[in-house]
Image (spheres, rainbow, N blue to C red):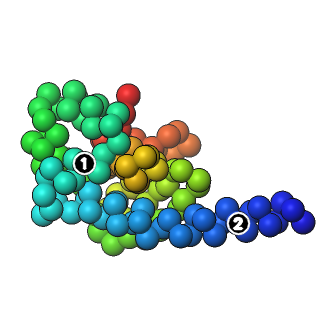
Amino acid sequence: MLGLAVAAALTGCASTQEPEVERVATAFEDTTGDAQARCELLAPNTLAALEENESEPCVEAIRSLPLEAGEVESVEVWGRNAQVRTTGDTLFLSQTDAGWRITAAACQPNGDAPYDCEVQAG
């Protein structure tokens, strides 16, 4: 019975985080939005990897990303990690001291293997 109570409590916490997770994901994918503000939504390691991979500052690199926002289809939160699926993309987020941040974006399913993401750390 204690297990059910813990599961219910965790589910409740996750569901309260979903609106913020969705807000961060949709703001990041808004290609008409301010590039600097979008870069600030990236987790630090993801930001560094993007700049290194593209050999230019994030505010320039972010404009060429193949982001296909579309409508949000689902938001799933597991503790300090989350996934947002849109009609054209899948994003992964982590909760940091600064709030929810994008850890991977422009991700496509890859069969049984991990997602193939254009933007990710490491």
The percent coordinates of residue 34 (x first, y second) are 13, 58
**Toward the viewer: 63 or 10?**
10
- Mark 2 belongs to which amino acid? Ala
Return the x and y of residue 56 as percentages of the image width and height: 11, 32
Residue matched to label 2: 9
Residue drawn at point x = 21 percent, y = 63 percent: 30
Tell me the number on the disc at residue 115. none
At horizontal 17% and vertical 46% (from top left) the residue drawn is 62
Q: Quadrant of residue 51?
A: top left
Of 64 and 81, the residue lying toward us: 81
Q: Is residue 27 left or right of residue 100?
A: left
In the displayed structure, does residue 6 sit left or right of residue 75?
A: right
**Residue 1 in view in this figure:** yes
Tell me the SS state at disc 1. Answer: loop
Label 2 vs 1, first from the N-terminus:
2
Residue that badge 1 annotates = 40
Q: Alpha-carbon distance for marks 2 and 1?
A: 31 Å
Residue 98 relative to residue 48: left or right: right
Relative image position of residue 82 (x, y in whole percent): 49, 55
- Name the residue located 27 percent from the left edge and 37 percent from the top edge: 47
